[in-house]
Amino acid sequence: MLGRKMKIRGKYLHVETYGYREKPALLYLHGGPGETCYDFTFNQKERLEDSFYIVAIDQRGVGRSEAVGEKEEFGFQDLVEDCEALRKELGIECWSIVGHSFGGFLGLTYVHQYPLSIHKVIFECPTFDFGLTSKELLQKAAKLFEKYGMDELKKEAFALIMSDSSTRELTEGYHRLSDRLGEKRMEIYRYIPENPTDYYAAYSEEEWEAFFDNSEYHGKLLFEEGIIFESLLPKLKEVKVPMLLMTAEHDAVTCKYHIEAFKKDAENGETIHFEQCGHTPHYEDPDRFEEIVKDYLKTEVATSTDL
């Protein structure tokens, strides 16, 4: 991976760039909190680099980026400001965004605060409300508990769904319960097991363990701060930038309430649906994902080609 360390707002971020500077710029924001951009660039860089100048990052404190120190001030707004500072550092006047999962939460906040910096936004199976998402994820976890004979955990999951728990309690409860699935936990998210990402093509198992130690602490701090537990759904009606919502048949993160709110409130919003796909179309259905991204951003591509 063509990664480099760039010092952004006093912290070194892992930044990957692909394609040519004269092409329209496209920023990828990964999910989590605490995932990396690796699986996106592994599956999409060769598909998209001829049409876009792709910028993909590991967010502050995540993965291959510099870790957040124990006594260092860090919060969700840092992730937003990093995006804008990186745009300026790269000399990009305006770019589009692909935000996956939690990256959609970050992307919506970014476009809401800095609309003049962003041409279009693509949300790939995002969450805009952790409480609604956690309830839907608990439903899928309960089905797996039943499938694997974990009846007590199934009861606990349904009890949490039916409770009046806060968004924080729902989210933390989901993580606690879903972790009991071990390796089977990915069945909550992934529907198509083909097109696997080769994580060891570039890094060893020991390196990945170190990367995810960073990510775990990053997530812990965001949970403690609590801003991510505030619903962003009301902000949809305030964004005038064109937005595309990607949904998938077997994805639980973007639940029906997200979709209804987006269709009702996103003034310049469009939706597109992936059938027979789970939470991650960019590698479960990579060819169609490529086609949709290029088609939605074709105005940018055409403008760049004409210059």
Image (cartoon, rainbow, N blue to C red):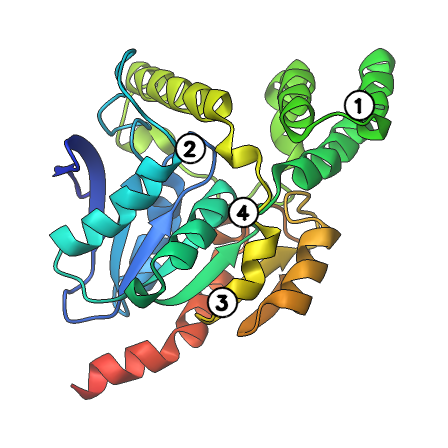
The residue carrying pointer 4 sits among few (fewer than 14), some (14 to 19) or many (20 or more) residues within 10 Å by Cα, namely: many
User: Which dot marks residue 160?
Assistant: 1
Q: Mark 2: which secondary structure?
A: loop
Q: Position of residue 73 (x, y in %)?
A: 29, 22
Q: Mark 4: which secondary structure?
A: loop
Among numbered discs 3 and 1, the one appearing first in the sequence? 1
In the figure, 129 relative to 115: above or below? above
Report the Cα–Cα distance between label 4 and label 3.
18 Å
Type of amino acid under label 3: Met
Type of amino acid under label 4: Thr
Front tag of 2 and 4: 2
Q: Position of residue 144 (x, y in %)?
A: 77, 27
Q: Mark 3: which secondary structure?
A: strand
Q: Position of residue 296 (x, y in %)?
A: 45, 74
Instruction: Residue 274: tell me if it is visible.
Output: no
Closer-to-camera residue (172/285): 172
Front tag of 3 and 2: 3
